[in-house]
Amino acid sequence: MKQQEQQLLQHTDKINDLLARYGVKFGIYKNNTFKEQLFPFDSIPRIIEHAEFEMLERGLKQRVLALNLFLKDIYSEKKIVKDGVVPEDFIFASSGYMAECEGVLPMKGIYSHISGIDLVKGKNNEWYVLEDNLRVPSGASYPMIARDLCRKSSPETFSNTKLLDNRNYAELLRKTMDNVNTGGHTVILTPGRYNAAYFEHSYLAEKTGAHLVSGSELFVENDCLYFIGAGGVKERVGAVYRRISDEYLDPMNFNPESLIGIPHIYDVFRKGNVALLNAPGNGVADDKGIYYFVPKMVKYYLNEEPVLQNAPTYLPFYAEDMDYVLKHFDDLVLKDVAEAGGYGVVFGNTMTAKQKEDFIALLKAEPRRFIAQEVIDFQDLDILDEGRIVPRKADWRAFVLMADEPLVWASGLTRFSRNPDSFIVNSSQGGGFKDTWVLSQ
Amino acid sequence: MAFLNYEYQMIIRYSEPVEKCYFTIKSIPADDFKQRSISYAISMSPNTTYSLGRDSFGNAQIIGSVAFPHSEYIYTIKGMVETNESPVTGGVNEALVGMYKYPHGKCVPGPKLTAFSKSIKALVEGCASDRDRCLTIMRELKKVMTYEKGCTEVGTSAEEAFAGGKGVCQDFSHIFITMLRIFGIPARYVCGLIVGEGESHAWVEACIDGSYVAYDPTHNIEISDEYIKLGVGRDAVDCAINRGVMWGGGAQTQEINVLVDKYY
C-alpha cells in the first residue's frame, strides 16, 4: 500500500491544480461578503478494510431505516412519544419540527432519500456516529471528482489496489430519484450560484442527467409542477432533488419572505404529484437533541441491537445527566442543539472560570438546548502539509441513499482539520478532504 | 341552536397591474361539535382555476393562481352554518395537540409576558379546574389590555402587543394563547366570523380534558352560538384567511366586507 500512496503523493499538487481548474469550490460568507474557497485535497487516502466496511454498512442501513421510520411516525401517530421513548419536548420544542408537515406522507413513505452520517474512528478502533444529516447533506461531489482525477493522474495506483469502485454515485442517486418520481422530469433545485455548494449542484446535475434549475424556472399549475423546457414548452416535473432548505422552499407554506422558493410546491407534494428529496420536516430527526435517541429508535422500530454506537452523550434535560455534566464539566464537549456547521460547540476545559459560570447558568435555565458528550479521542490520519507528513484529526461522512432499500456508497467524504490543535473538521471552518478507499477484500 | 348566514368578501386593488399571483385561502368552515356547514358558494374575480385541499392543521384550503395581468382581485364566500351554544368545539387528536403546547411564531413569551404570568401565578394555580384557570387568565388579561384599533399590525407578536397594552382581537388571542401554554394548557388560535362585526374575528381554543373549549379573550367570554370558525393554527399566520405571492402590482389596498345574520 505504501508504494501506491507514494505515487499519489507526487500528484498532490497536480490534482489540486485540476480541482481548481474544474471549479471544485465551496462558498462561504465571512463578514457579509461571499467568498469562494478551494477545498484543499490531500492525496493520502483514508483506507477502510473490507470487513470493517461491511460492519459500517450494516449499521448505517439500520440507522437510516430507523430514522426514516421515526420521521414517518413523528408526522403521523407519534407512537414513540406515546410509548415514552422520546419525550415530547424533544419533538415540539425542536426548531426542526415542522407542524406544516403533519399528516403528509411522502412517496413510498421515504423521508430521507440522501443521508449524510458523520462518524469518527476512536483510538480504540471503534467507530462512533457523531451526527446524522437528513436535510440537505452535501459533499458527495468532492470524493467523486477527486477519485476521477486521481485515477487519471496515477492509473497504476488503482490497477494495483483492490478497492471498490466509487464511480457509481451518480447512478445510485439517479435510481433514488427515479424510485419516487411521480411522472415527469427530474430536476436539481439550487438556490443559485452564490450558494456554498453550487459546484456540487451543477456537478450532480451533469452526472445524473437531471436538469439544474433555480426556483424561478419552476411553477405550479393545476396541482402539478412544471418547468419551461427547451423551445418554451411546458414540461411536467416528477422529482425535485432540492438543495434549498425547508424554510425557503415554498413561500405559501413556509417562510413567506422567500424569493428563491416555488409558491405551492409543497401543496403539489402534499397531493402526491411530485417527489421532494429530501422530504421537508426532516430537521426533527437530525437535531442534536434527538441524536441521543437514535440507538433507542433502532431498538424501538426495528427490534434490533444498534450496530453503530453514538459518542457517549448526556442530556442535561434529565436530572441525573445534569448531575453528571456538572461533575465532569471539564471532560466534556457541549453542543447547542440549534447550531450546525461546527458552530455552538465548546469544550469544557477551554473555558475561563467566568465563561464556565455563565455557561452553567444558561445550561440550568435551558437544559433542553444542550447536549454534552465525552470527547472522543479519534484517530489521526496522515496528511501532507508543506512537504511533511503530519497527523491530523479527520472524520468521515458516509452517504446512504434510500431507494427501495438503503444503499451505502462505498466511498464518502473524509474531512480533516488543518489545524493540529482542532477537532473541528467542517469545511466552513477551513478543513480539507481526502479520498476514502474501501478495500474490496 | 342557531343558523348563521354569512358572507365574507375580500377585495384587493393594485395601483399597477399584477403580472401573476398565487393565493391560498382558508375560509371554508369545517364541521365540528359546535358547527355544521350546511352550504357554501365561492366566487372569484378574475375568474381563475383553483383546487381544494387540506392543510396540516385540518383547515380546508383553496389553492390557485391568476396567471395574467389584473389590477383587482375579489374573493367571496357565502354560506350557511348551523351552530350550538356550547363552547366545546371538538375532541382532541392526541397526535396533533403537542404543537399547541409550546411557544411558537407570534406566541413566544418575552420578559413582559413572563412577568405577567408570574404576577397571576398564585391566582391561576388556586383555581379548581382548567376551565376556571382559562377564565381567570382571560379576566386578568382584560384588566391590563385595552381594545384599540391601529396600535398594532398584522405582524405584531404577543409580547409586543402586551408591552404596548393595547391591541385588537388577534393580539388578545396571541397573548391569551401564550399565557395558557405557560400554564400548561395547550391552546390554538381560531380565525373566524361573528355576528355584528364587519371584519373577521379571532379567538382561542384551549385543550381541556380531551376537548377543545373556545374562549373569546377580546370580549372576555366563552363563545356563544354567534361564532363561525374558519381556521385554526398555532398562531394567526397558520390560519390566515389569505396568503399570497405576486409579481408587480405596486401599492395595494385591501377591503374586507363581512356580514353574519342569525336565525333561530
Image (tube, rainbow, N blue to C red):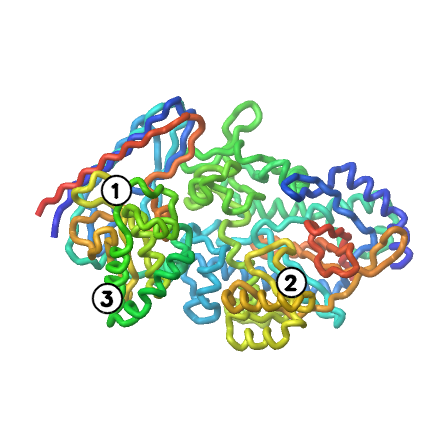
Between label 1 and label 2, give the one nearer the viewer: 2
Q: Is residue A246 above or below residue A299?
A: above
Badge 2 density bin: few <14, some 14–19, many ≥20, Cα 10 Å: some
State which chain disc 1 sits on: B
Closer to the camera, A86 or B128? Answer: B128
The residue singled out by tag 2 in the image is A346
The residue singled out by tag 1 in the image is B200
SS at badge 1 = loop
| Mark 1 vs mark 2, CA separation in Å | 49 Å
Splitting the image into 4 quarters, where does residue A206 fall?
Answer: top right
Residue B156, given in percent of the width and then of the height, sits at 38, 45
Image point 42% across, 58% down: which residue? B111
The residue singled out by tag 3 in the image is B132
SS at badge 3 = helix
Residue A55, given in percent of the width and then of the height, sits at 69, 66
Amino acid type indicated by mark 1 = Ser
Q: Is residue A310 in view from this perspective?
A: no
| Mark 1 vs mark 3, CA separation in Å | 27 Å
